[in-house]
Amino acid sequence: MADKKHEKETKVDISGENIANNEEISAEAEEETAIETPSVEELKRKIEELEALLKEKEDQHLRMAAEYDNFRRRSREEREATYTDAVADTVGEILPIIDNLERASMYDDDSKVKEGLVMIAKSVEAVFEKLKVESVGAVGETFDPNLHNAVLHAEDDEHGEGEIVEVFQKGYKKGNKMIRFAMVKTVN
C-alpha cells in the first residue's frame, strides 16, 4: 500500500529519473507568484510614493543649487567690497602726502622746498607705520635673497661677508608679503 501511494506522488520517466507530480508543481508555482507578485493597487501606490520622493529630492537639489549660487555671489561681492575698501583706505592715507607735494611745488625758495620734502618723507614713514609696512634694505644689513636684490657686488676687506654697502632702492614688506625687494650693492 505504501508503494501505491508512492506511485501516485512520483512518476518515473523513460531514463529512470523521478519527476514530481504536476499537481505539486502548479501548487508551488501558485504559492511563489502569490508571495512575489503584489497587487496592482499596491504597485500604483508604491509608484506614487517613489514619484513623490523623487519630486522631494529634486526640490532639495534645486534649493541646494540656488543656495550655493547665492553663496558664491555673496562671497564674490564681499571680496570685491573688501578690495575696494582696502584701496580706498590706502589712498585715503596717501592723499595728505600728495597735498603736501603740491604745496611744496609752489615754493621757489630751495630751503623751503627741502624743508617741505623732509616733512613729506616723515609723513610717508608715518603712513607706512600705520599701514604696518616695513622698509627693508639698509646699509650695514647682511644680504638676504628673500629681501634684497643684489645688483652690484664688490670686494672690500673693511666690511663683513655679504654686507650691504649701498642701497639703490629701498624694499618694502607687510608681514611676510614682499611688496618690493630692495636693490642693493653687497661686498665680499
Image (spheres, grey):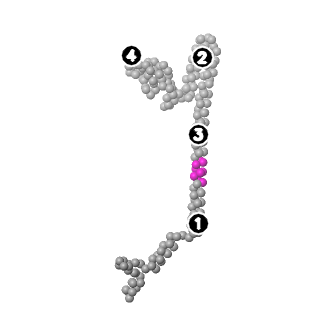
Circle number at residue 116: 2
Q: Secondary structure at mark 2?
A: helix
The numbered dot on residue 76 is 3
Labels 1 and 2: the sequence-earlier one: 1
Of the two numbered discs 4 and 2 on the same chain, state the one appearing first in sequence: 2
Callout 1: SS: helix
Residue 5 vs residue 83, the one in the foreground: 5
Residue ID at (43%, 26%): 145
Q: Nearer the viewer, mark 4 or mark 2?
A: 4
Three-letter amino acid code at the position of disc 1: Lys
Q: Quadrant of residue 121?
A: top right
State which mark lies toward you, 4 or 1: 1
The amino acid type of the residue labelled 2 equals Gly
How far apart marks 1 and 2 lie (CA) works out to 91 Å
Compute the Cα span from label 2 to label 3: 43 Å
Q: Nearer the viewer, mark 1 or mark 3?
A: 1
Q: Which residue is mark 4?
A: 156
The CA span between labels 1 and 3 is: 48 Å
Sooner in the amino-acid sequence: mark 2 or mark 3: 3
**Label placed on residue 44:** 1
